[in-house]
């Protein structure tokens, strides 16, 4: 049936005798091929504008739009345009296809915008439905992964909430140089932890290639650490962690244990009760907590045994005897010997420009100067790769020489007892 569909009420008039809900097609009287396929449901007219065209001898029906969203006049213009495009051999896209394509493009644009705003923090530490973080994929599977994640986070602190795709080599260079000015070793270490994460992100096109190129180029001139603490400094640090054991905090007691054993920071901080054999003056470090993945026996000086016995008693006094950790404030987690504890010791002792690792170096240096062999010192410090313990010799000597190591531990105890009690001839005053 043909109607002048340019008139506003043409479709309604055409449907008047057709209220049975069945589809009904109306053809325009002016534009060839323009139709409206409509029907009335519950008093509402629904349907589509269509245009029939012939392409390569075949008749096709192209959807132009909804009759309730497009007027008859607009439908005519759309039909004329469609027929002209067909005549010129252009590709004809129906309104529904165009709408779907527009929606797809909008969704892609929104997704790209979301990707462009994804921050370094999200990529490194946050999982979402479609992507797992670098922390989940890499760091959590490494024995030292927690420390690596912490160092990387500290190094990138000023950039973590910047969209990754906006990260430039100048951002990274600025952060690196700022840290290198005050703490070159920290800057170098931080960059070492960040590098594999940036390689991972670069391969997945989250960061630009030139950012990684800069990482390869950045270097900082550092001087090998040679800090050996003087006896008076040792005495000051010991006092700063609690002059009397009763006054020492769990963290202070842990630092005292560091000073007496030459162990690594984390090995002492996370010490377990079941690792201690104080009746034999020994601390047995298991494989899963040893840096070199070898079990190790630390031989303890008498003062170290006293510190540890006091710590266990203090735990019991505070109702924390069921905790697996020796040094703990709440019975749930071990103490953390980080920058805050170090700053408190610096403030109380007046000793600066030192690290916890310098305690190990001081012990090794003093014992070596007093004739203790390098092999014994290495074994006391749990050094695996060294000239004195390499190859087959290193494999078979790990758990031996305990009598010699106990003797060396007692010697170290005598040395530090003199320092702590102030009985030494080479005590020097701390400047300032």
Image: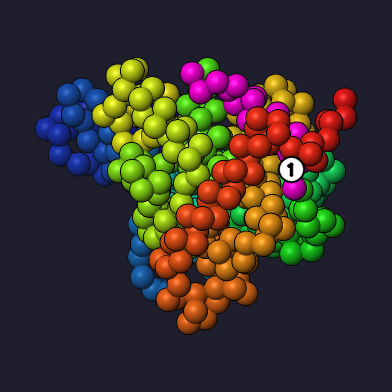
Magenta residues, dominant SS class: helix
Q: Say left or right for 274 vs 201.
A: left
Quadrant including the C terminus: top right
How far across and how far down the image is residue 161, in percent? 62, 36
Q: Residue furthest left?
A: 20
Q: Say left or right for 101 vs 385.
A: left
Colour pattern of the rendering: rainbow
Which residue is located at x 30 percent, y 19 percent? 319
Quadrant including the N terminus: top left
Camera-nearest residue between 198 and 387: 387
Camera-nearest residue between 89 and 73: 89
Camera-nearest residue between 412 and 97: 412
Q: Is residue 19 visible?
A: yes
Which residue is located at x 55 percent, y 34 percent? 256
Q: Quadrant of residue 219?
A: bottom right
Q: Quadrant of residue 417?
A: top right
- Which segment did they paint magenta? 228-246
Does residue 1 sit above or below 51 in this rendering? above
How far across and how far down the image is residue 346, in percent? 71, 28
Does residue 358 sit above or below 326 in this rendering? below
How far across and how far down the image is residue 399, in percent? 41, 66
Q: Report if residue 375 lies within the magenta region.
A: no
Q: Say left or right for 222 vs 45.
A: right
Q: Residues within 10 Å of mark 1 (few under 14, many from 20)?
A: many
Q: Which element is circle 1 on?
A: loop
Q: Is residue 112 visible?
A: no
Which residue carries the number 1 mark? 229
Q: Quadrant of residue 58?
A: bottom left
Which residue is located at x 50 percent, y 62 percent? 404
């Amino acid at each position: 049936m043909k109607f002048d569909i340019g008139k506003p009420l043409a479709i309604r008039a055409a449907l008047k005798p057709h209220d049975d809900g069945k589809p009904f097609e109306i053809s325009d009287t002016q534009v060839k091929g323009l139709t409206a396929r409509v029907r009335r449901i519950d008093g509402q007219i629904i349907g589509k504008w269509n245009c029939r065209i012939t392409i390569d001898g075949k008749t096709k029906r192209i959807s132009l739009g909804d009759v309730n969203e497009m007027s008859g006049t607009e439908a005519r213009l759309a039909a004329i345009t469609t027929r002209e495009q067909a005549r010129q051999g252009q590709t004809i896209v129906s309104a529904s296809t165009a709408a779907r394509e527009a929606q797809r493009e909008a969704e892609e644009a929104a997704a790209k915008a979301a990707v462009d705003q994804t921050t370094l923090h999200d990529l490194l530490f946050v999982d979402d439905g479609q992507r797992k973080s670098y922390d989940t994929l890499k760091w959590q599977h490494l024995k030292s992964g927690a420390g690596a994640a912490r160092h990387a986070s500290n190094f990138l602190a000023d950039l973590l909430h910047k969209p990754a795709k906006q990260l430039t080599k100048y951002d990274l260079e600025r952060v690196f140089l700022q840290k290198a000015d005050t703490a070159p070793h920290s800057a170098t270490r931080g960059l070492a932890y960040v590098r594999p994460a940036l390689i991972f992100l670069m391969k997945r096109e989250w960061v630009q290639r030139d950012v990684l190129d800069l990482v390869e180029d950045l270097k900082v001139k550092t001087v090998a650490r040679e800090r050996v603490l003087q006896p008076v400094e040792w005495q000051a640090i010991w006092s700063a962690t609690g002059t009397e054991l009763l006054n020492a905090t769990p963290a202070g007691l842990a630092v005292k244990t560091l000073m007496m054993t030459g162990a690594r920071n984390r090995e002492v901080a996370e010490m377990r009760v079941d690792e201690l054999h104080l009746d034999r003056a020994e601390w047995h470090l298991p494989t899963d907590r040893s840096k070199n993945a070898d079990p190790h026996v630390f031989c303890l000086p008498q003062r170290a045994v006293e510190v540890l016995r006091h710590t266990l008693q203090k735990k019991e006094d505070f109702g924390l005897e069921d905790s697996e950790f020796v040094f703990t404030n709440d019975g749930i987690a071990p103490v953390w010997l980080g920058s805050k504890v170090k700053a408190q010791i610096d403030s109380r002792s007046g000793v600066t420009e030192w690290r916890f690792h310098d305690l190990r170096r001081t012990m090794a240096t003093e014992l070596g100067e007093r004739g203790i062999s390098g092999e014994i010192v290495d074994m006391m410090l749990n050094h695996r790769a060294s000239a004195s313990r390499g190859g087959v010799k290193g494999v078979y000597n790990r758990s031996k020489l305990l009598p010699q190591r106990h003797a060396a531990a007692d010697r170290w105890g005598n040395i530090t007892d003199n320092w702590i009690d102030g009985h030494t001839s080479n005590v020097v005053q701390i400047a300032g």
